[in-house]
Image (cartoon, rainbow, N blue to C red):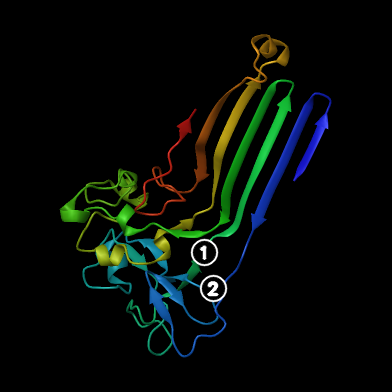
Amino acid sequence: GWNDKIGDFSYGVSANLSDFISTIDYLQNTKNIKDGKIQVAGIGFNEWYGYIAEGIYKTQEQVDNSAKLNDQVKVGDVWYRDISGPDGVPDGNISPEYDRVPLGNSLPRFQYGGNINAAYKGFDLSMSFQGIGKQTVRMAPEMIQPLRSNYGNVPDIYDGNYWSLFNTDEQNARAKYPRLSNTSANNNYTISDFWLFNGSYFRLKNLTLGYTLPQSLTKKITINKIRVYASASDLFCLSNYPKGWDPEMGVSNYPITTSLV
């Protein structure tokens, strides 16, 4: 932290940064896999564990000439890399036993926060912020998968961005998400790096601007101090999360809202 004053101008800055790395040194003859995360000796605790995606199948030739997770895979589905097999080499099949690998740390790194304040004569300004510098986050099926709950709605971020038989070849070449299909849900929305992204964020937690009236005025009405101010909490957040997602609230909780006073 640092505080200083230069004439009528005063200011202060404080910040904090913390980091940790959690690894498993020993786990006797076993590995635990739960919710797409793995606990096994030699890697980070609760690393994401799944398939490596090559992208989306754009042609039938690609489907025919590659290993697949099941027989329902079609053009427009997610394409996975054949990493290994029983003999330690690619075997032409995508299987959970041999083709899933650690995909990165699910725990947050470089958590930080800080405060800045400044004052000049009767005016004062303060702000506080917080964030995470690095974290691998998964787009959970509850938030991204279309046609859930009896073939319900399609997420807004899918609109115009998925592979479709009704698209032109150029549109499908640019498709970011797989085709709308419930029968291929087990293939498309299983754990893979296709749905992982950088979950770092910066959030402005509070911004306050105030003005304190001179005592020469307030004492005339027998008041020691009057300060008027405007304050905003959670004004904005910079992140790679899709619009409407809150990096602090997870899948099912209500997002943090902006408040103005």
Q: Amino acid at mark 1?
A: Leu
Q: How many marks?
A: 2
Q: Earlier in the sequence, mark 2 or mark 1?
A: 2
Q: Quadrant of residue 7?
A: top right
Q: Amino acid at mark 2?
A: Gly
* Vertical placement of residue 34 versus 250, above or below: below
Q: Indicate the position of residue 160 as horizontal and vertical percent values.
A: 31, 43
* Vertical placement of residue 170 versus 190, above or below: above
Q: Indicate the position of residue 238 as horizontal and vertical percent values.
A: 52, 43
Q: Is residue 118 left or right of residue 256?
A: right
Q: Residue furthest front?
A: 222
Q: Decide which of 221, 33 is in the foreground and name it.
A: 221
Query: At 39% across and 57% down in the image, what residue appears?
Result: 139
Q: Indicate the position of residue 85 as horizontal and vertical percent values.
A: 38, 85
Query: At 68% across and 22% down in the image, what residue appears?
Result: 123
* Vertical placement of residue 261 versus 28, above or below: above
* Vertical placement of residue 210 versus 151, above or below: above
Q: Quadrant of residue 203?
A: top right
Q: Residue furthest right?
A: 7
Tag 2 near tag 1, CB within 8 Å: yes
Q: Is residue 50 visible?
A: no
Label 2: how many Cα within 10 Å (few below 14, some 14–19, many 20+): many
Q: CA distance from mark 2 to mark 1?
A: 9 Å
Query: At 67% across and 19% down in the image, what residue appears?
Result: 224
Label 1: how many Cα within 10 Å (few below 14, some 14–19, many 20+): some
Q: Secondary structure at mark 2?
A: loop
Q: Secondary structure at mark 1?
A: loop
The tag on residue 44 is: 2
Q: Indicate the position of residue 39 as horizontal and vertical percent values.
A: 46, 77
Query: At 19% across and 50% down in the image, what residue appears?
Result: 152
The tag on residue 107 is: 1
